[in-house]
Amino acid sequence: MIEVLKILFSMPFLLYSCYSDLNSRRVSNKVWKYMLASGSGFVFYEIFTDGFSYLMPLLLSGVLVFTAVYLLFQFGAFGGGDAKGLIVLSLLFPSYPVFSYSGNTYPLLGVPPIGIFAFTVLGNALLMTTLVPLGMFCHNLLHFSPEMIKNPLYMFIGYRTEISSLKYKKHLGLLEKFELDESGSLKKTFARGGLNFDADQKPELEEYLKKGLIEKDIWVTPGLPFMLSITAGFITAVFFGDLIFYTVMRLIVS
Protein backbone atom coordinates (compact mmCIF):
# COMPACT_ATOMS: atom_id res chain seq x y z
CA MET A 1 0.00 0.00 0.00
CA ILE A 2 2.81 2.43 0.84
CA GLU A 3 4.32 1.94 -2.60
CA VAL A 4 1.07 3.09 -4.23
CA LEU A 5 0.94 6.09 -1.91
CA LYS A 6 4.51 7.06 -2.82
CA ILE A 7 3.71 6.78 -6.52
CA LEU A 8 0.60 8.94 -6.15
CA PHE A 9 2.57 11.40 -4.03
CA SER A 10 5.34 11.73 -6.65
CA MET A 11 3.15 12.29 -9.70
CA PRO A 12 2.07 15.93 -8.99
CA PHE A 13 5.70 16.98 -8.53
CA LEU A 14 6.77 15.22 -11.73
CA LEU A 15 3.87 16.67 -13.71
CA TYR A 16 4.60 20.18 -12.45
CA SER A 17 8.26 19.75 -13.35
CA CYS A 18 7.15 18.79 -16.88
CA TYR A 19 5.06 21.95 -17.12
CA SER A 20 7.94 24.10 -15.88
CA ASP A 21 10.44 22.42 -18.21
CA LEU A 22 8.15 22.87 -21.19
CA ASN A 23 7.49 26.50 -20.38
CA SER A 24 10.97 27.72 -19.48
CA ARG A 25 13.34 24.74 -19.87
CA ARG A 26 14.04 25.12 -16.16
CA VAL A 27 12.81 23.40 -13.02
CA SER A 28 13.16 25.31 -9.76
CA ASN A 29 15.16 23.69 -6.97
CA LYS A 30 12.16 24.38 -4.72
CA VAL A 31 10.19 21.64 -6.49
CA TRP A 32 12.67 18.96 -5.41
CA LYS A 33 13.18 20.50 -1.95
CA TYR A 34 9.45 20.40 -1.29
CA MET A 35 9.18 16.89 -2.73
CA LEU A 36 12.00 15.59 -0.54
CA ALA A 37 10.86 17.44 2.59
CA SER A 38 7.23 16.36 2.33
CA GLY A 39 8.15 12.86 1.18
CA SER A 40 10.60 12.30 4.02
CA GLY A 41 7.68 11.00 6.06
CA PHE A 42 7.65 7.90 3.88
CA VAL A 43 11.39 7.43 4.43
CA PHE A 44 11.15 7.74 8.24
CA TYR A 45 8.13 5.43 8.33
CA GLU A 46 9.94 2.71 6.41
CA ILE A 47 13.08 3.11 8.51
CA PHE A 48 10.92 2.69 11.63
CA THR A 49 9.07 -0.36 10.29
CA ASP A 50 11.88 -2.14 8.39
CA GLY A 51 14.97 -0.93 10.20
CA PHE A 52 18.38 -2.01 8.89
CA SER A 53 16.92 -3.95 5.97
CA TYR A 54 15.61 -0.63 4.61
CA LEU A 55 18.69 1.48 5.41
CA MET A 56 21.05 -0.56 3.24
CA PRO A 57 19.01 -0.19 -0.01
CA LEU A 58 18.46 3.49 0.85
CA LEU A 59 22.20 4.11 1.20
CA LEU A 60 23.06 2.06 -1.90
CA SER A 61 20.41 3.71 -4.08
CA GLY A 62 21.25 7.23 -2.92
CA VAL A 63 25.03 6.91 -3.36
CA LEU A 64 24.97 5.09 -6.72
CA VAL A 65 22.33 7.32 -8.29
CA PHE A 66 23.96 10.51 -7.00
CA THR A 67 27.33 9.43 -8.42
CA ALA A 68 25.88 8.42 -11.78
CA VAL A 69 23.75 11.51 -12.36
CA TYR A 70 26.51 13.83 -11.13
CA LEU A 71 28.90 12.39 -13.73
CA LEU A 72 26.25 12.61 -16.46
CA PHE A 73 25.51 16.21 -15.47
CA GLN A 74 29.21 17.10 -15.64
CA PHE A 75 29.33 15.67 -19.16
CA GLY A 76 26.30 17.75 -20.12
CA ALA A 77 23.99 14.76 -20.62
CA PHE A 78 21.13 16.61 -18.91
CA GLY A 79 20.38 19.56 -16.68
CA GLY A 80 20.69 20.07 -12.95
CA GLY A 81 16.94 19.92 -12.40
CA ASP A 82 16.76 16.50 -14.08
CA ALA A 83 19.64 15.24 -11.93
CA LYS A 84 18.06 16.47 -8.69
CA GLY A 85 14.73 14.91 -9.59
CA LEU A 86 16.38 11.51 -10.09
CA ILE A 87 18.25 11.83 -6.79
CA VAL A 88 15.01 12.54 -4.92
CA LEU A 89 13.38 9.52 -6.59
CA SER A 90 16.34 7.37 -5.53
CA LEU A 91 15.68 8.33 -1.89
CA LEU A 92 11.92 7.89 -2.01
CA PHE A 93 12.18 4.58 -3.89
CA PRO A 94 15.37 2.84 -2.69
CA SER A 95 13.76 -0.49 -3.56
CA TYR A 96 11.76 -1.23 -6.66
CA PRO A 97 8.05 -0.53 -5.98
CA VAL A 98 5.95 -3.68 -6.37
CA PHE A 99 2.17 -3.68 -5.90
CA SER A 100 -0.92 -5.59 -6.96
CA TYR A 101 -4.09 -4.26 -8.50
CA SER A 102 -7.10 -6.05 -10.07
CA GLY A 103 -5.31 -9.37 -10.03
CA ASN A 104 -2.14 -8.07 -11.70
CA THR A 105 1.26 -7.57 -10.08
CA TYR A 106 3.19 -4.49 -11.16
CA PRO A 107 5.59 -3.99 -12.81
CA LEU A 108 4.14 -6.34 -15.40
CA LEU A 109 7.57 -7.30 -16.78
CA GLY A 110 8.90 -8.07 -13.31
CA VAL A 111 11.61 -6.43 -11.23
CA PRO A 112 14.94 -6.19 -13.11
CA PRO A 113 18.05 -7.86 -11.64
CA ILE A 114 19.51 -4.46 -10.75
CA GLY A 115 16.50 -3.30 -8.79
CA ILE A 116 17.52 0.33 -8.33
CA PHE A 117 14.34 2.07 -9.39
CA ALA A 118 15.86 5.45 -10.35
CA PHE A 119 18.24 3.70 -12.78
CA THR A 120 15.27 2.05 -14.47
CA VAL A 121 13.50 5.43 -14.68
CA LEU A 122 16.60 6.96 -16.29
CA GLY A 123 17.07 4.03 -18.66
CA ASN A 124 13.44 4.18 -19.79
CA ALA A 125 13.73 7.95 -20.24
CA LEU A 126 16.84 7.62 -22.41
CA LEU A 127 15.21 4.87 -24.47
CA MET A 128 12.19 7.06 -25.16
CA THR A 129 14.43 10.00 -26.02
CA THR A 130 16.00 7.93 -28.80
CA LEU A 131 12.64 8.11 -30.56
CA VAL A 132 13.05 11.88 -30.95
CA PRO A 133 15.59 11.69 -33.84
CA LEU A 134 13.25 9.33 -35.69
CA GLY A 135 10.35 11.73 -35.23
CA MET A 136 12.55 14.64 -36.33
CA PHE A 137 13.58 12.73 -39.46
CA CYS A 138 9.94 11.96 -40.32
CA HIS A 139 9.07 15.64 -39.84
CA ASN A 140 11.84 16.64 -42.25
CA LEU A 141 10.67 14.11 -44.81
CA LEU A 142 7.22 15.67 -44.71
CA HIS A 143 8.77 19.14 -45.17
CA PHE A 144 11.56 18.07 -47.48
CA SER A 145 13.61 20.61 -49.40
CA PRO A 146 16.65 20.15 -51.68
CA GLU A 147 18.86 21.94 -49.12
CA MET A 148 18.43 19.00 -46.74
CA ILE A 149 20.44 16.78 -49.09
CA LYS A 150 23.58 18.80 -48.28
CA ASN A 151 23.39 17.83 -44.59
CA PRO A 152 21.27 14.67 -44.32
CA LEU A 153 22.40 13.92 -40.75
CA TYR A 154 20.96 17.25 -39.62
CA MET A 155 17.54 15.80 -40.42
CA PHE A 156 17.77 13.64 -37.28
CA ILE A 157 18.59 16.44 -34.85
CA GLY A 158 16.97 19.58 -36.25
CA TYR A 159 14.85 21.22 -38.90
CA ARG A 160 14.99 24.22 -41.22
CA THR A 161 13.07 27.40 -40.44
CA GLU A 162 12.96 30.95 -41.76
CA ILE A 163 15.24 33.48 -40.09
CA SER A 164 12.39 35.97 -39.94
CA SER A 165 10.33 33.56 -37.80
CA LEU A 166 13.00 33.02 -35.13
CA LYS A 167 11.92 36.05 -33.12
CA TYR A 168 8.59 34.33 -32.46
CA LYS A 169 10.06 31.01 -31.33
CA LYS A 170 11.60 29.89 -28.06
CA HIS A 171 14.09 27.29 -26.90
CA LEU A 172 15.92 26.87 -30.18
CA GLY A 173 19.62 26.49 -30.90
CA LEU A 174 21.49 27.06 -34.14
CA LEU A 175 22.92 23.89 -35.65
CA GLU A 176 25.52 25.88 -37.56
CA LYS A 177 27.94 28.58 -36.52
CA PHE A 178 28.46 31.39 -39.03
CA GLU A 179 31.78 33.23 -39.26
CA LEU A 180 33.18 35.63 -41.83
CA ASP A 181 36.76 34.92 -42.88
CA GLU A 182 39.32 37.48 -43.99
CA SER A 183 38.21 37.27 -47.61
CA GLY A 184 34.61 38.10 -46.69
CA SER A 185 33.34 34.58 -47.33
CA LEU A 186 30.96 33.05 -44.82
CA LYS A 187 32.13 29.86 -43.16
CA LYS A 188 29.59 27.47 -41.69
CA THR A 189 30.58 24.91 -39.06
CA PHE A 190 28.53 22.38 -37.13
CA ALA A 191 27.55 23.62 -33.64
CA ARG A 192 27.58 20.56 -31.41
CA GLY A 193 24.61 20.59 -29.06
CA GLY A 194 23.11 23.67 -30.69
CA LEU A 195 24.49 27.20 -30.45
CA ASN A 196 22.47 29.36 -28.05
CA PHE A 197 20.33 31.76 -29.99
CA ASP A 198 18.65 35.02 -29.03
CA ALA A 199 16.94 36.79 -31.91
CA ASP A 200 17.56 40.19 -30.30
CA GLN A 201 21.28 39.52 -29.96
CA LYS A 202 21.91 37.96 -33.37
CA PRO A 203 21.08 40.64 -35.96
CA GLU A 204 24.01 39.44 -38.06
CA LEU A 205 21.87 36.60 -39.41
CA GLU A 206 19.57 39.08 -41.10
CA GLU A 207 22.62 40.99 -42.35
CA TYR A 208 24.03 37.79 -43.86
CA LEU A 209 20.65 37.18 -45.49
CA LYS A 210 20.52 40.68 -46.99
CA LYS A 211 24.01 40.22 -48.43
CA GLY A 212 23.01 36.88 -49.94
CA LEU A 213 25.53 34.95 -47.86
CA ILE A 214 22.92 32.61 -46.42
CA GLU A 215 19.47 31.45 -47.48
CA LYS A 216 16.27 32.48 -45.75
CA ASP A 217 16.03 29.10 -44.03
CA ILE A 218 18.60 27.87 -41.52
CA TRP A 219 19.03 24.70 -39.45
CA VAL A 220 17.87 24.88 -35.84
CA THR A 221 17.54 22.28 -33.10
CA PRO A 222 14.89 22.40 -30.37
CA GLY A 223 15.84 22.29 -26.70
CA LEU A 224 14.18 19.13 -25.42
CA PRO A 225 12.50 19.15 -21.98
CA PHE A 226 14.02 15.98 -20.50
CA MET A 227 11.63 16.00 -17.53
CA LEU A 228 8.95 14.77 -19.92
CA SER A 229 11.13 11.75 -20.67
CA ILE A 230 11.88 11.21 -16.97
CA THR A 231 8.18 11.34 -16.08
CA ALA A 232 7.32 8.95 -18.90
CA GLY A 233 10.22 6.76 -17.74
CA PHE A 234 8.80 6.82 -14.20
CA ILE A 235 5.33 5.76 -15.33
CA THR A 236 6.61 2.95 -17.57
CA ALA A 237 8.97 1.78 -14.82
CA VAL A 238 6.08 1.58 -12.35
CA PHE A 239 3.64 -0.26 -14.59
CA PHE A 240 5.85 -2.19 -17.00
CA GLY A 241 9.41 -2.34 -15.66
CA ASP A 242 12.85 -1.97 -17.20
CA LEU A 243 12.23 -1.57 -20.95
CA ILE A 244 15.92 -1.79 -21.90
CA PHE A 245 16.51 -4.98 -19.90
CA TYR A 246 13.31 -6.54 -21.25
CA THR A 247 14.18 -5.62 -24.86
CA VAL A 248 17.72 -7.00 -24.55
CA MET A 249 16.46 -10.24 -23.01
CA ARG A 250 13.89 -10.68 -25.77
CA LEU A 251 16.59 -10.19 -28.40
CA ILE A 252 18.85 -12.74 -26.69
CA VAL A 253 16.08 -15.30 -26.32
CA SER A 254 14.87 -14.87 -29.91
Image (spheres, rainbow, N blue to C red):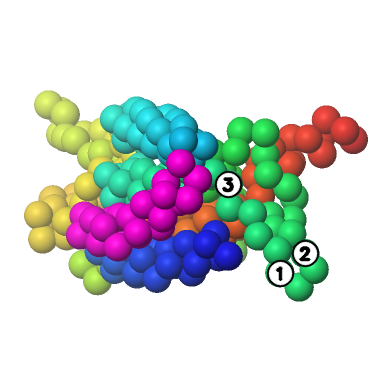
Q: Hey, what amino acid is under mark 1? A: Tyr
Q: Hey, what amino acid is under mark 3? A: Tyr
Residue 120 figure quarter:
top right
Along the line of sight, the residue nearer the viewer: 28 or 219: 28
Q: In this view, does 205 lie to the left or right of 19?
A: left
- Counting from the top left corner in percent of width and height, residue 126 is at 52, 44
Q: Name the residue under label 1.
A: 101
- Counting from the top left corner in percent of width and height, residue 183 is at 15, 28
Q: Mark 3 points at which residue?
A: 96
Badge 1, how many Cα within 10 Å: few under 14, some, many 20+? Answer: few
Badge 3, how many Cα within 10 Å: few under 14, some, many 20+? Answer: many
Q: Residue 104 carries which label?
A: 2
Are the residues at dot 1 and dot 2 in contact (C-beta closer than 8 Å)?
Answer: yes
Identify the element where label 1 is drawn: strand
For the record, the magenta segment spans: 28-51
Question: First in sequence: mark 3 or mark 1?
Answer: 3
- Counting from the top left corner in percent of width and height, residue 209 is at 22, 55
Identify the element where label 2 is drawn: strand
The residue shown at (42%, 49%) is 48
Is residue 5 among what the camera can see? yes
